[in-house]
Image: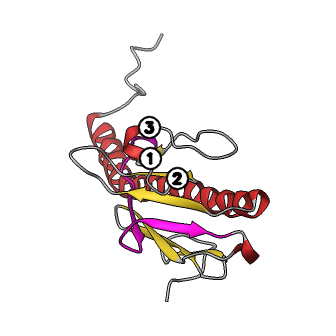
Amino acid sequence: MSGPRNDQSGLTLVGLLVALGLLAILTGLAVPAWQRQIEHHRLTAGVTAVYGALVQLRRHSIFLNRPLVFIFRPEIAGQGWCFVMTDDPACDCHRGACPLTSGARRPIEAADFPLLDLRVLPRNGRIKFYPARGTTSAGSVELQVGLSTARIIVSSLGRIRVCSSSLAGYPECS
């Protein structure tokens, strides 16, 4: 008959500490990459929304054969930025829906896109679309989330394009 066996298998304290150290290092490397990915997704969502609104407004202007306006209001008194498509140049999107011949449109607000900063040039925050040949008053919309940026440029001929040095698939802004 043999005595008790002494070969135990299991996890040692040293093995556990090595595994936890590796886990901490991998987590430290993954968190910044994850945050950059979230920034890119937020910026992409903002670009898609603004670009879509501008294209839709241009089409409505041509279809309805009347000038329409993209109005942007910067943050004032704690209210975040907002923009709206309308045929009323005096409309203020901070006050609610604005009229459009095809029905009232709810403004797009900063609360819809957390951490997205948005600026519109020209300074009056208006880009007007004219039905004749789809021309516009020209301007650009700059979007930023963290260090990621993009710009939507509207030419006077009505061409709407996106450029970004942060997002793949778009040309760099010059």
The extreme left residue here reads: 77
Query: Can you give x and y, in whole percent of width and height, for residue 108 in the image?
Result: 49, 46
Q: Is 171 on the left or on the right of 3, as rendered?
A: right
Q: Is 126 on the left or on the right of 53, as rendered?
A: left
Residue at position x 53%, y 83% from top? 172
Query: Can you give x and y, in whole percent of width and height, for residue 5 in the image?
Result: 41, 19
Q: Is residue 25 above or below residue 104?
A: below
Of tags 1 and 2, the one toward the viewer is 2
Q: Earlier in the sequence, mark 3 or mark 1?
A: 3
Q: Which amino acid is tagged 3?
A: Gly
Boundaries of the magenta span = 111-130
Q: Which amino acid is tagged 2?
A: Asp
Q: Secondary structure at mark 1?
A: loop
Q: Earlier in the sequence, mark 2 or mark 3?
A: 2
The extreme top residue here reads: 1
Q: Is 77 on the left or on the right of 28, as rendered?
A: left
Query: Disc 3 marks which residue?
Result: 96
Which colouring convention does the figure follow? secondary structure
Query: Can you give x and y, in whole percent of width and height, for residue 16 in the image?
Result: 32, 37
Query: Disc 2 marks which residue?
Result: 88
